[in-house]
Image (spheres, helix red, strand yellow):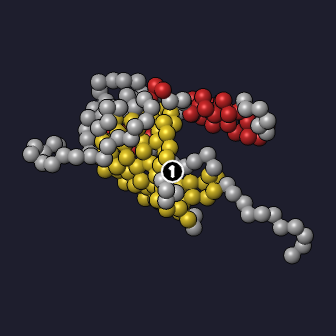
Amino acid sequence: MPEPWQPIYQWPMPDVPKLEECELEEDLFRRRAMDDGIDEKRKELYLMYAAARADGPIAVRRASWTREENGLLTSMFWMQARTGRSERYEAPFQKCILAYIIPGGSDALAMSSTLDHSIWYYDDDFCCEDGLLYVVNCPRAGDGRGVAHGKLYNRVGKFVAVTCQEGVVRADRRGPERKGKL
């Protein structure tokens, strides 16, 4: 509930392309699958990702990413629920949708599992069907765990929510193969 006469300020929304200007992830994966010289296994994987994204309840569009001087990578995604707009989707229902659409995992991960996940809502006036910008960074990953911080904005730049997620991360990476017998 809004409290009148209280201070109001927010982190500004980053300058990113509008939702309609950003490529759907399923289209990105289909395009990558058609690249010249791509091996069949990777092509199959990209097509599988594309089909999963196209059939999913959330449309994801990559908006931008930045890398700070200290190496911190910030990824920005437009996310839009494919539920169809309805007047019955009031604030409590929108908050449930927002909690559902917060992504977990990555293309390069073999396994990812959330250990702790929190969302702080700072506004009730948003609609997941209209699209939300998710600005996320990972200030620390190591020893099989990582933490991600996120900020969500509606299309007009109003700061809607903050997220924090800690998870188990298993990257699909292997050390060099050893030659010969041990």
Q: Residue furthest left?
A: 5
Q: Amino acid at mark 1?
A: Arg
Q: Secondary structure at mark 1?
A: strand
Foreground of the two, 161 or 16? 16
Location of residue 181 by image quarter? bottom right
The image shows a total of numbered marks equal to: 1
* Residue 106 x %, y %: 57, 48
Which quadrant is home to the N terminus?
A: top left
The residue located at (57%, 29%) in the rendering is: 54
The residue located at (19%, 46%) in the rendering is: 8
Q: Residue furthest right?
A: 180
Residue 119 in sight in this render: yes
Q: In the figure, 146 relative to 8: above or below? A: below
* Residue 64 x %, y %: 49, 39
* Residue 180 x %, y %: 90, 70
Image position of 38 (left or right of 150): right
The residue located at (31%, 32%) in the rendering is: 156
Residue 92 in sight in this render: no
The residue located at (63%, 37%) in the rendering is: 49
Q: Write down the residue under mark 1.
A: 67
Q: In the figure, 88 relative to 116: above or below? A: above
